[in-house]
Image (tube, rainbow, N blue to C red):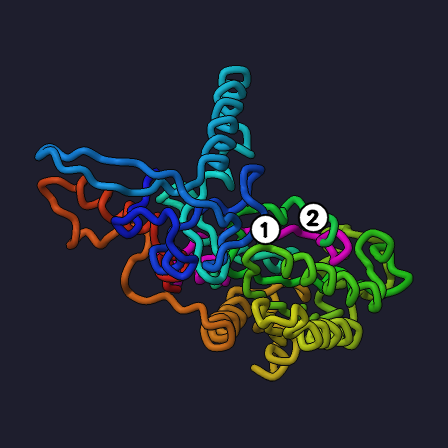
Amino acid sequence: GFVRHAEASFRGVSLRSRVVMDAFCRCIGCAGCSGTRNPLGGCCDKEPQRYTVKRRNGEKSDGFRKFCKPCLRVQEQQRAVGKKQVSELGYHPRNDLINPLSGGAHDLNGHGHDHVPGNRPRIVLFGDSITEQSFGEGGFGGAFADKYKRHADVILRGYSGYNSRDAVALLRNVFPTNDPTPPVLVTVCFGANDAVAEGSFMEKIQGCPLDEYQENLNSILEHLSKLNPPPAVLLMTPPPVNPVAWKQTCDDNNYHGDEQPDRTLNRTGAYAHAALGVARNFQGADGHGLFVVHGLNLFDKLLGAAHDWSTKFLSDGLHLSPEGYRVVTKLMLNAVTQKLGLEADATPSDFPSFLDVDWKDPGSTIEAFVGKKMNAQRGDEFDI
């Protein structure tokens, strides 16, 4: 990959001139980097390797590659290793699919972007069964995919039965801190299982004390804040429960033999309000305003939305009904667009509209768009 800087050599020129020409290695982190951030926020302050193009008319044009010589050398070594792995394994290993050494441009916020032009920013839905079932009728999973179509990919990471302790154990596998293209938004919803009643059959399997629940949510936020760049986070409370209806569901399906309901409205409410406290106290915890957390109170919002909320919004006393999902979806989208500022415009950001594609030579249009996109700042190319 090549990138055109200002058509002038910068040997001996001032640092200020290099900033104007964006004449810095664009690597987003490798063993070849200088270890010193450049003034534009990149990981390497070395000079990119120069190249000269001889035109058909005999004129010569100078330009610079995206990376400096040491970083290029590391990339060549990585590619050699990748080819060897492919020949031995017969497929591309995971660490070769998302290669931080092949990333594109950086901007003042330190954003890097994926080396695959067709890839989009990611929105990750992280939670328990409330999230796992969110692509069903009325669910927020499908609504988010529709809202951000052609702008972002919505990734479902919902795990039925999991509590916040399980979620912490998942973090390094679901959100690796060395991911060069972390999500732009993560929704987090745990607590419905943590709040199982003390002394119930499921307490040892799913239950989590309230103080530990708060610590676990803090750990989740702390981990997400370490991603570079960090995503916006929507931390949601568990919805309210109908203990009698859920007890009937458990009896009908032989889940356990408890004589009393293993969920209570008051206990779930305590966990919901604790989650809001975690979100509120974590605001601005990084000290730079780069990590934004918004708490969404599903518990009280659903309780106050209708007098017959338990039959209208819950399917079995614990999980959401289609109507319940519709209410939650509206609350989530309002929070994401108004509080977190993630709005999608009408213009596709992944590839141009079909009206802008040259029907006689679509390849030239696509490649021109890709070239511009891969050299642009991520904040400009994905205006969501």
Confirm whether the magenta stretch covers residue 37: no
Q: Nearer the viewer, residue 55 or 237?
A: 55
Q: Is residue 324 above or below residue 256?
A: below
Q: Which residue is mark 1?
A: 157
Percent across and percent down for residue 283 are 65, 74
Q: What residue does disc 2 label?
A: 170
Residue type at mark 1 is Arg
| Above/below status of 166 relative to 241 | above
Residue 142 covered by magenta stretch: yes
Please state if 194 lies on the left or on the right of 240 as rendered: right
Magenta stretch, residue numbers: 139-167
Please state the horizontal and vertical placement of residue 136, each as a whole percent of the image.
50, 56
Which of the 4 quarters of the picture holds residue 365?
A: top left
Q: What is the secondary structure assignment of the residue under circle 2? A: helix
Q: Nearer the viewer, residue 279 or 374?
A: 374
Task: Please indicate, yes or no, whether residue 122 appears anywhere in the rendered image.
Answer: no
| Residue occupying the point 56% across, 82% down | 305
Mark 2, Cα crowd under 10 Å, few <14 / some 14-19 / many 20+, is few
Nearer the observer, disc 1 or disc 2?
2
What percent of the width, then of the height, locates residue 234? 58, 67
Q: Residue at x 82, y 61 (%)?
A: 208
Residue 176 in the image: state x and y as whole percent. Answer: 63, 47
Mark 1, secondary structure of its residue: strand
Q: Amino acid at mark 2?
A: Leu
Quick one: 308 or 63, which is closer to the camera? 63
- Residue visible at 87% across and 54% down in the picture: 204
> How far apart are the alpha carbons under marks 1 and 2?
10 Å
Check if mark 1's residue and mark 2's residue have beta carbons within 8 Å.
Answer: yes
Where is 380 relative to 6, above or below? below
